[in-house]
Amino acid sequence: MNETNPFLFNAQIEVIQYRRKSIEYISDPGVIATQTSVFVEREKPIKLYRFAELSALLGSLKNKCTYRLLLHIYDNIAENSDTIKLEREVIYEATGLRRTSYYDAIHELLSLQLIAKKSQNVYYINPNYLFKGDRIKFMTKRLGESAVKVVKIIETNNTQDLGVGTKDNVASASGQETTSGGSEW
């Protein structure tokens, strides 16, 4: 069993960095220029990531019961969490799986590295493929800024250019909601 999520080792999220330069007049003639950066995931955060790779993994599934278990995980993953409790009786009731098919499905998801065992009935979810919430904030909290790989930088003087997301899916590093479209540092 694992003490930490094994999928977080060497994990990195590709982001686009939006930079807004502004000028603040502190005193005449003093001028101070400031810069704000907003980080937005390059991949759209729709819960499933690396879709081409994930499609290939799902296409290689040998057991249709594994789809049922994966859909159960997908439907029941908690916001901003990389673990899920998979109790057999709950899974049996929710998915119609039976003992053998449940264990076959668990084994297949483990072998594909979509989940990893944490403790009895608790599994890590590989956030490289499946996550609900602000992955940038989650990963930087766990791994620091090295978890973010800037793949594009956009310089702007227009504050409206930073509004690339919605208030619902945006949180600053301090945990306060913003309208900036990503995690702000």
Image (cartoon, helix red, strand yellow):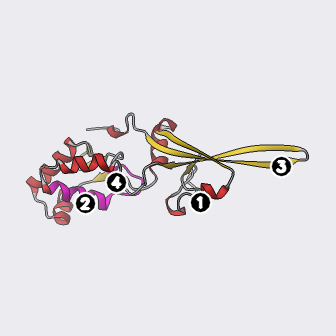
| Mark before the other along the chain sequence, 2 or 3 | 3
Q: Which residue is mark 3?
A: 25
Q: Which residue is mark 4?
A: 48
Q: Earlier in the sequence, mark 4 or mark 2?
A: 4
Question: Residue at label 1?
Answer: 179
Q: Are marks 4 and 2 in contact (CB under 8 Å)?
A: no
Secondary structure beneath dot 2 equals: helix
Q: Quadrant of the N terminus?
A: top left
Q: Amino acid at mark 3?
A: Tyr
Q: CA distance from mark 4 to mark 2?
A: 14 Å
Q: Closer to the camera, 97 or 114?
A: 114
Of the numbered discs 4 and 3, the one sitting upstream in the chain is 3
- Identify the mark nearer the N-term, 1 or 3: 3
Read off the residue under disc 2. Answer: 72
Look at the image and give the residue range highlighted in magenta: 65-83
Q: Position of residue 180 (x, y in %)?
A: 59, 56
Q: Residues within 10 Å of mark 3 (few under 14, many from 20)?
A: few
Q: Residue at x 18, y 56 (%)?
A: 88
